[in-house]
Image (cartoon, grey):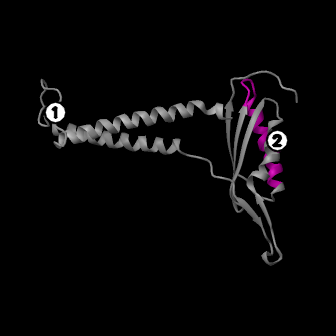
Amino acid sequence: MANLNRPARVNRALLAVLGLVLLAAGAFALVTHFGALRVLDPSSPVVPSLSAPPTWAYYAAIAVAVVLGLLCLRLLAAQAFRRPRPGTWRFESEPERGGTRLNGSVATEPLAGEITAYQGVRSVNATLAGRREDPTLYLTVGTEQGADLGELRERIDEDAVPRLRRALDLDALPVVLEFRLTTKTGARAL
């Protein structure tokens, strides 16, 4: 499954390099402007042959730079998003008599095995996160190129998830489903 997300790693690396270059350029400009580094004359214009732009252009450039910076921070935060770890659920109606604990990853193993057996599915990563009162099921399904995603979605929604919901005795189980297409094709023995 690690090979399926190689473009995301490249994107993060390129964003990090671009961010470092922009930070270094901004730091160089600030240090030079305030005279801490005497490489360039702070009073000399960037482009000597042009006249200075109107004052409003500076404010517009600052506003655009701030908006772009905030959008870049939002993109960086989205890149860093990770799924929550599965927790341990407690089934205790009478705590003085004892109770049962269930790890979320143990609960999703049969579900992942069932979905993996579906036609066109290569791999499944299932995470059951949240408290028992407010759970969320995260599914990442690696599929073959020719797989019918609509049929897979319908089968997961109508067969696999309700079975897990009944097994855990839940009224509702929200699902976040992500399909990832593999470059491999071909038939598998079922």
The numbered disc on residue 186 is none
Q: Residues within 10 Å of mark 2 (few under 14, many from 20)?
A: some
Q: Residue at x 14, y 37 (%)?
A: 42
In the displayed structure, would residue 132 be above or below residue 9? below
Main SS type for the magenta part?
helix
| Residue 19 image position (x, y, % from top left) | 40, 37
| Start-end of magenta stretch | 143-166
Q: Quadrant of the C terminus?
A: top right
Q: Residue at x 74, y 62 (%)?
A: 89
Q: Which residue is mark 1?
A: 40
Numbered disc 1: secondary structure? loop
Choose top left, top right, bottom left or bottom right for residue 141.
top right
| Residue 94 image position (x, y, % from top left) | 80, 75
| Residue 174 image position (x, y, % from top left) | 70, 51
Q: Residue at x 24, y 37 (%)?
A: 29
Numbered disc 2: secondary structure? helix
For the residue pair 185 and 158, the one nearer the viewer reads as: 185
Q: Is residue 124 left or right of residue 60?
A: right
| 2 or 1: mark nearer the eye | 1
Is 155 a magenta residue?
Answer: yes
Q: Residue at x 69, y 58 (%)?
A: 87
Task: Say which amino acid is labelled 2.
Answer: Gly
Q: Is residue 144 left or right of residue 25?
A: right
Distance Cα–Cα, label 2 vs label 1: 65 Å
Task: Say which amino acid is labelled 1.
Answer: Leu
Q: Which residue is mark 2?
A: 113
